[in-house]
Amino acid sequence: MMENQKKVSEYHYKEPKVTGKKRPVHTTPYDKEIDKHMKTLFPDRKERVFYEQSSEFLQIDIHLLEAPTKQDFHVLYTVGMSALPMTLPPDLLPQYKDLELGELMLLLPAEWSLPLPEDGKVDNRLWWPVNLLKYLSRFPHEYKTWLGWGHTIPNSEDYVPYDESTKLCGVMLGALQEEISLLRSKDGTQINFYSLIPLYKEEIEGKQKEGTEGLLTKLSSLNGFGMIIFPDRPNVYHNEK
C-alpha cells in the first residue's frame, strides 16, 4: 500500500482561517466496520471507548483495546477521521484516490494507565498520546491537506515536547502489516490505518537527511520498532553528530 506514495518532507503549516461560522458535525459511516476490523485483528481484549463529549466539525472517538497480558500492549485507534476525504495533491489523483480516507492508531505498553478524567481534567503525562490522536485525525481536514505513510509533523516550529515527562516532540506516520493497515469496506471504499511513531527532534532531522527507510532501519533496534510508545525510549540519533 504505502511504497508507492511520493516522498514528502516535514510538514510546516499555517493556522486555518477562522470564519466564525458553525460547521456541521461529520461522523464516519464506517464506524461499525472499523470496530469489527480492529477487534478481529486484536481479539479477546477488553474494550473501552472515549467518546467525543463536545464535537466540533468531526466526531472523533478513541477506542482502546486493552493489553491481555503484562507482556502485551494496548491498541488505541480513532473512529471518525474517515468521515471526510483528505485533500490529496492533484498529481496524486486519480491514481492514488484510495489514500483519501484514513484512521490513526497507536500502541501503548501494558503498564500505561488511562484513568477516567476527574472534574473534566486529565493527566497530560498519561493522556498526551490520546490528545495526539485527536489532533492529527482533524489535522488534514482543518488544513486542507493529507496525511500518509512517512509523513512527519513536528509539534510546532520549536519542537515542543508533548509533555514534561518526555522529550518526544514530533510524529511520523508508519504502518503495520497490510492486513491491519488496510480495510476494504462493504461498499468497496479503502480505509488506511496509520500508526503513530513519536520522534525526537534529532530523529526528525535525521529523517530529512536519510529518508524514511533510513530512520525506520534505526528504529528497528528499539522494542516495538518505535511503534510502542515509551516516553523515555533511546534516541536513535543520540550519538550522531
Image (cartoon, rainbow, N blue to C red):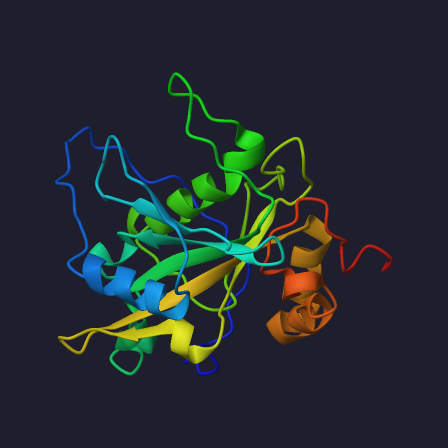
For the N terminus, give its image quadrant.
bottom left
Q: Quadrant of residue 99?
A: bottom left
Residue 216 percent location from the top left of the image:
65, 70
For the C terminus, give its image quadrant.
bottom right
Residue at screen point 35% across, 74% down: 182
Residue 210 percent location from the top left of the image:
69, 71
Residue at screen point 49% across, 37% down: 114
Q: Is residue 89 visible?
A: no
| 132 or 120: nearer the viewer | 120
| 7 or 82: nearer the viewer | 82
Quick check: 236 above or below 167? below
Q: Residue furthest top?
A: 119
Residue 237 percent location from the top left of the image:
78, 59
Label total for image: 0
Q: Quadrant of residue 214?
A: bottom right
| 150 or 102: nearer the viewer | 102
Q: Is residue 190 visible?
A: yes
Horizontal side of residue 188 vs 48, given as left or right = left
Residue at screen point 70% across, 67% down: 209
Residue at screen point 40% across, 57% down: 104
Residue 201 percent location from the top left of the image:
68, 49
Horizontal side of residue 186 vs 42, given as left or right = left
